[in-house]
Image (cartoon, rainbow, N blue to C red):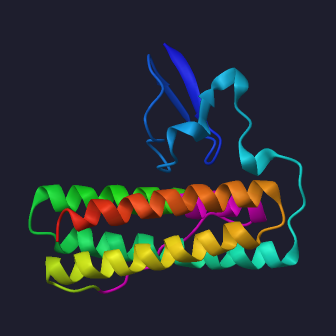
């Protein structure tokens, strides 16, 4: 058994093999290191510019909104598979918001209830739109960030949100 640590969320995975993706934040395997070699990005010494802080605040808002939306969609799901999928997406998005709190030194997120459609098809379509918006925005943030750790974070989020789009397209 080994300990593997995700350099994006800082969470540890214990197992015999490195996971393909982080089971907590969804970051790709290249961001997962053996525990002794890990250096999570939010712990790295690098001051964030005011512009990057604004990007982080926008990320926080989007991720918290996604958590609330996916919680609602899980509650409306007609099959256990869809419910479980939305619950997992909600947990991943909550992890993203929590990472931002570590960057900004703010309190953990509070999630409010929102409404969503009763139709699974409408919810799938909205999910693709939400994830596409986030992936596009995070790619832009990665390009415009001046700090290396912010670039890494936004690049990882872009990859995760893009993978979510591919997942949901399987349901459409």
Q: Where is residue 81 in the image (x, y as percent from the top left)?
A: 15, 55
Q: Quick one: 21 or 166, which is closer to the camera?
A: 166
Q: Where is residue 140 in the image (x, y as percent from the top left)?
A: 64, 75
Q: Is residue 83 above or below residue 41?
A: below
The C terminus, quarter of image? bottom left
Q: Can residue 68 be seen in this view?
A: yes
- The quadrant in which residue 55 appears is bottom right
Residue at 42% x, 57% y is 91
- On whether residue 48 falls in the magenta region, the answer is no
Q: Is residue 110 above or below residue 170?
A: below
- The quadrant in which residue 118 appears is bottom left
Q: Is residue 83 above or below residue 25?
A: below
Residue at 60% x, 40% y is 31
Q: Position of residue 26 (x, y in %)?
A: 47, 49
Q: Which residue lies furthest to the top in this view?
A: 1
Count of number-bearing discs = 0
- The quadrant in which residue 145 appears is bottom right
Q: Which residue lies furthest to the front in this view?
A: 143
Residue at 43% x, 35% y is 20
Q: Position of residue 37 (x, y in %)?
A: 71, 25
Q: Give the range drawn in magenta.
A: 96-115
Q: Is residue 60 visible?
A: no
Q: Quick one: 38 or 108, which is closer to the camera?
A: 38
Q: In this view, does 86 lie to the left or right of 66?
A: left
Residue at 77% x, 65% y is 104
């Amino acid at each position: 058994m080994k300990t593997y640590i995700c350099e994006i969320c800082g969470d540890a995975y214990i197992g015999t093999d490195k996971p393909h993706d982080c089971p907590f934040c969804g970051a790709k395997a290249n961001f997962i290191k053996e525990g002794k070699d890990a250096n999570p990005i939010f712990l790295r010494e690098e001051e964030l510019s005011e512009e990057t802080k604004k990007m982080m605040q926008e990320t926080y808002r989007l991720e918290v909104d996604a958590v609330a939306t996916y919680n609602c969609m899980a509650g409306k799901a007609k099959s256990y598979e869809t419910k479980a999928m939305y619950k997992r997406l909600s947990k991943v998005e909550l992890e993203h918001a929590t990472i931002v709190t570590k960057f900004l030194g703010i309190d953990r997120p509070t999630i409010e209830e929102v409404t969503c459609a009763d139709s699974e098809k409408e919810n799938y379509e909205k999910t693709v739109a939400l994830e596409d918006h986030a992936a596009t925005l995070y790619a832009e943030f990665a390009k415009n960030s001046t700090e290396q750790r912010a670039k890494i974070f936004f690049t990882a989020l872009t990859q995760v949100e893009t993978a979510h789009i591919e997942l949901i397209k399987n349901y459409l």
